[in-house]
Structure formats: structure tokens, C-alpha cells
């Protein structure tokens, strides 16, 4: 069933929408959740919460691309689950990519100066200026939380080259954000 | 700045960028060793396709030898590259490489070395073959993506390539 039809089912409040979403996207969403949570049980919980969140948010939303909309929900929900558990222990690709991004940050900077949405606009501009291959690697790592091994596969590069590329991109992003006035 | 805010900020990147990456993720490019194998197959195919032309060159070369016997040795033509191979070792520390330019940036470019089966950047990278490009010896404005250039490189003590001169 195509995505427009599935979204239409959500708008008609037809529970078949959830079945069709699950049939089509369960594997995809589970991969995203597992990358972050590294735990099958938590990932399953995250994906189920994604269906519920989709049910509660469509309507009023009418996503142009259902797959991307669902990926955002799963990412948000999985990160929330992980943060709830973070007081105990962090793990998975999320923790690794988080520690990589932490090299961009200064612990002394006031958090008040940061607005995630404004920051994301600058990151969008930064990413749009990159060549496709570099952009894919960066988004693969820091949005989808894919492993370096997976990124190497779909970018057609060696793992060492991916690591080098990500290192350079983090450094470029740090310089760019600094130039844009972010206190890093 | 808080790193968790950066992770949050990544949640708001545009749909267009997410979809572009997602397409690449679902297509799953050839694994790296398979890419090398594919590059090797393309090289073999290229040699097979060029075989008639090479045979013709052999005939011309034979004619040149015959001419040499009667007219004496011809003058050396330095404009002709030493070999049609992708890599030619000219001495212990200098090699001639054919590089295929894949991307050009402000301060560097990336290139594919068919003979090595790898893409390289003009930076030093951990565990990868490296080509250092000296900005003074190359006008980037003249290069385009897809261009094939022949470069003389020095091999440093770590086995990395250091660009000496672009030949064409």
C-alpha cells in the first residue's frame, strides 16, 4: 500500500493504518531504534511507541513523506528512552556518536545560548554545502546513528576512510559553528 | 554548547537531506572489496576493448624498429608517457600514477587510483593510501570532476604518495 493511502487511513481513524505501517516499516524503524538503544526489547518498545505517536499526531499532521516522519518519531522516542536510562548506563551507537560529537563542545558554555532549532538551521546549511558522499556519511552517523561499518558499505568507502572523513567533518562543523557565532 | 543539544539539533535537519541519505542506505553500495573487484573487472574489460588498438601499436612499433635499422635511431619523444599501465615505477621512490578526479573542494580534491582500487583524499588518513597535493603545483580551477590526470608522485617512508608533478 502506498504511503498516501496509509496516511489517509490515519486521517479516517482506521486502525488498519497501524497494521499497514507496521507491515511496511517495522524492519526499517527497528534498525533505527536498535542503533540507538542496542537492545531488542527497548527497540521493540520504541517502535510500538512510534505507531502510537503516529496515530496521535496524524491528524493534525499530514506528512509529505511518511517514512521520514516515522524515522523522526522513532529517533525521538528512542533517544528519550535512552535518556531515561542514562542515569544508569549509556550504550550503543548513540553513546559512541555522542562522545564523538562531544569533541565539538565546551562544557563551560552556557546552555541558555543554545536553541536547538536555530542550531539545526546552521547545521542544515553546513550539510547542504557538502558533497553528497560526505553529507550521507555525516547524516548516516549522526542522524541514523549507523555504525562506521554500515556507512562504509553504503558509501563505498573503507572504514578507515569513513573515520577520517567523519573526523574532518566534525572539525569543519566546529569551525563553521564558531564562525556563525555559536559559543563552542 | 551541550552535545546532547547537537544530537537534538540533528533531529531537525531537513526531510530532503534525510531522504537523500536514506536512499543511499537502502541501496547499499557495493562493499569496499567488491568495489575493488569491480574496478579490476572494468580495467580488464578496458584492456580487452583496447586490444585491437594495442595490436596496431605493436605493428607500428615493429615498423619503427625496421626503420631504425635503415635510418638510425629516432630522436627521443619526451611527450610520450612511459607506459599505458596505471602505475609505473620509474625508480625506488618515484611513481607515475593515473588518478581519476572524483570531487573538487576549495583546498583539496579527492581522486580514485584505479591501480590501487581506492579513493584517496589530499589529506593524511589513518590506514589509508594518501596523496598529498601541493597547491603550488596544481591549478584546481583547471580540474573537473571525472578528469583523469597523470601525476608523478614520490613514495614516502610509510608507503604514502606525495605529489611531485602533474603531467597532464
Image (tube, coloured by chain):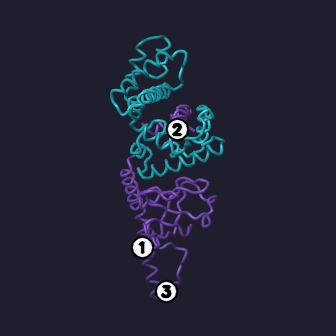
Chain colours: A cyan, B purple
The answer to whether the residue labelled 1 contacts the one labelled 2, judged by CB atoms less than 8 Å apart, is no
- Residue found at the very far left of the displayed protein: A40
Position of the C terminus of chain A, as image quadrant, is top right
Q: Which sits earlier in the primary sequence, circle 3 or circle 2?
A: 2
Query: How far separated are the C-alphas under marks 1 and 2?
Result: 64 Å
Give x and y (percent) for residue A97: 45, 41
Q: In this view, does B133 lie above or below B2?
A: below
Q: Residue B34, percent across and down?
A: 36, 50
Q: Residue furthest top?
A: A13
| Disc 3 chain ID | B
Q: Which residue is drawn at 52% across and 50% down?
A: A168
Task: Work out whether mark 1 precedes mark 2 in sequence or the reverse, and give the earlier one.
Answer: 2
Q: Distance between the residues labelled 3 and 2?
A: 71 Å
From the viewer's perspective, is the residue at label 3 or at label 2 nearer?
Answer: 2
Near-viewer residue (B83 or B141) = B141
Percent of width and height locating residue B150: 52, 66
Mark pair 3, 1: CA separation: 18 Å
Residues B60 and A60: in front is A60
Q: Which sits in the foreground, B72 or B23?
A: B23
Dot 3 lies on which element? Answer: loop
- Badge 3 is on which residue? B73
Rendering coords of residue A52 (x, y %): 43, 18
Relative to A82, does residue B72 appear above or below in the rendering? below
- Residue linked to disc 2: B3
- The residue identified by callout 1 is B58
In this view, the residue in front, A168 or A65, is: A168
Q: Residues within 10 Å of mark 2 (few under 14, many from 20)?
A: some
Chain letter belonging to callout 2: B
Work out which residue is located at the far front of the displayed protein and give it: A108
> Residues at marks 3 and 2, common chain?
yes
Q: Mark 1 lies on which chain?
A: B
Amino acid at each position: 500500500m502506498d504511503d498516501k493511502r496509509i496516511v489517509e487511513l490515519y486521517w479516517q481513524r482506521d486502525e488498519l493504518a497501524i497494521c499497514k505501517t507496521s507491515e511496511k516499516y517495522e524492519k526499517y524503524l527497528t534498525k533505527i531504534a536498535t542503533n540507538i538503544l542496542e537492545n531488542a526489547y527497548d527497540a521493540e518498545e520504541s517502535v510500538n511507541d512510534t505507531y502510537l505517536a503516529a496515530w496521535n499526531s496524524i491528524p493534525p499532521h499530514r506528512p509529505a513523506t511518511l517514512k521520514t516522519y516515522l524515522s523522526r518519531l522513532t529517533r525521538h522516542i528512542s533517544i528519550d528512552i535512552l535518556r531515561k536510562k542514562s542515569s544508569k548506563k549509556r550504550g550503543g551507537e548513540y553513546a559512541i556518536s555522542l562522545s564523538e560529537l562531544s569533541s565539538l563542545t565546551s562544557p563551560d558554555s552556557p546552555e541558555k545560548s543554545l536553541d536547538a532549532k536555530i542550531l539545526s538551521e546552521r547545521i542544515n546549511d553546513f550539510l547542504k554545502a557538502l558533497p553528497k558522499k560526505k553529507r550521507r556519511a555525516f547524516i548516516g552517523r549522526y542522524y541514523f546513528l549507523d555504525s562506521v561499518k554500515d556507512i562504509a558499505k553504503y558509501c563505498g568507502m573503507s572504514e578507515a576512510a569513513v573515520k577520517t572523513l567523519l573526523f574532518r567533518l566534525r572539525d569543519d562543523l566546529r569551525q563553521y559553528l564558531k564562525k556563525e557565532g555559536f559559543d563552542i | 554548547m551541550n552535545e546532547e543539544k547537537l544530537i537534538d539539533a540533528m533531529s531537525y535537519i531537513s526531510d530532503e537531506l534525510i531522504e537523500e541519505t536514506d536512499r543511499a542506505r537502502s541501496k547499499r553500495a557495493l562493499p569496499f572489496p567488491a568495489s575493488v573487484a569491480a574496478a579490476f573487472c572494468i580495467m580488464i574489460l578496458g584492456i580487452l576493448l583496447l586490444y585491437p588498438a594495442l595490436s596496431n601499436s605493436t605493428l607500428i612499433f615493429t615498423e619503427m624498429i625496421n626503420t631504425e635499422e635503415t635510418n638510425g635511431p629516432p630522436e627521443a619523444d619526451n611527450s610520450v608517457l612511459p607506459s599505458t599501465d596505471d602505475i609505473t615505477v620509474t625508480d625506488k621512490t618515484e611513481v607515475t600514477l593515473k588518478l581519476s578526479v572524483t570531487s573538487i573542494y576549495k583546498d583539496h580534491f579527492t581522486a580514485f587510483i584505479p591501480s590501487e582500487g581506492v579513493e584517496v583524499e589530499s589529506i593524511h588518513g589513518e590506514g589509508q593510501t594518501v596523496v598529498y597535493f601541493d597547491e603550488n603545483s596544481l591549478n584546481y580551477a583547471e580540474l573537473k570532476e571525472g578528469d583523469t590526470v597523470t601525476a608523478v608522485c614520490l613514495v614516502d617512508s610509510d608507503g604514502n604518495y606525495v605529489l611531485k608533478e602533474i603531467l597532464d
